[in-house]
Image (cartoon, grey):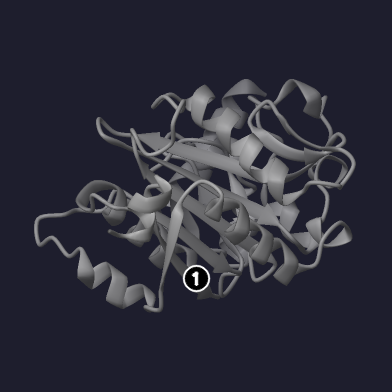
Amino acid sequence: MSQARKVGLPLMNLVRFNGVPILKQLHLEEKLLRTSSDNWCIINNGTNSPTVVMGLSGKPSELLDLESVLQDQVPVIKRFTGGGTVIVDPGTIFVTLICNRDAVPGVQPYPRSIMYWSGMLYGEVFKGIDGFHLRENDYVFGNSKFGGNAQSITRERWIHHTSFLWDFKAGNMAYLKLPSRAPEYRLARSHMDFICRMKDYMPRSVFIDKTVNAIGNHFSVKPLDLDVNAVAADVADAKFVHTTRLLMKEELEEALSVSTRELCHQS
């Protein structure tokens, strides 16, 4: 009898990466969500270069300083999950959980139920650190956000992925506009007044180790020593089409042009 059956815990495949490009990671996650029947935890310790990642329904003209984004040639990705807009870089730690709907007792396949459980999970990780809690849909220390979440729920499975701001460059935040829809606790604060660096609270390697340990309290964890291409090939489906994509320069230029015309009409 397997260890997972002995202890009554579902099996969770654990894959750890270092610096995998976020587009490649998101392509992998989408494929695993839709074509695999296993539970997965993916931890990516940083991505290769600064990249803007928008939610499925995000509009570049409303969320980005398009002139700066185009001038500095910052890649912009529209991912397959909902949620807000983030800029990620080598200082970002990504943790993704992909689960079958019956994998976690008491967790229903609804956003609030999944968020509540994830808050408890990371409560184990940050135990002993004052001020940690789930606030609206963010992980915060006090009133400062350090982790943003996004989800997608299918008929049989769900994904919950988080971008943890272990560190960031203040200048990169200027690519993001203040969103029209924001958490109430933000109180219209600027990005720099709203977010904080996780490195001021916990070392990078300690966070990753504690996260793996916390997941091990809920799953029988099976580490897989595979690279991102190998895992993607393992669940390859010739008919699978990604919805996560890199926005073309022409799309961003058109969004800027439309935004500029709208401003001219308003003035």
Q: Which residue is mark 1?
A: 16
Residue 254 x, y percent position in the rendering? 43, 46
Q: Is residue 173 above or below residue 110?
A: below
Residue 193 x, y percent position in the rendering? 87, 42
Q: Nearer the viewer, residue 1 or 20?
A: 1
Residue 60 x, y percent position in the rendering? 52, 42
Residue pictured at 43% horizontal, 24% vertical: 110
Q: Residues within 10 Å of mark 1 (few under 14, many from 20)?
A: some
Picture quarter containing residue 194? top right
Q: Quadrant of the N terminus?
A: bottom left
Q: Is residue 46 above or below residue 155?
A: below
Q: Quadrant of the C terminus?
A: top right
Give the residue type at disc 1: Arg
Residue pictured at 86% horizontal, 56% vertical: 201
Instruction: Tell me how many marks there are.
Output: 1
Looking at the image, can residue 79 be seen? no
Looking at the image, can residue 263 be seen? yes
Q: Is residue 41 toward the left or the right of residue 70 in the image?
A: left
Element carrying mark 1:
strand
Residue 80 x, y percent position in the rendering? 37, 44
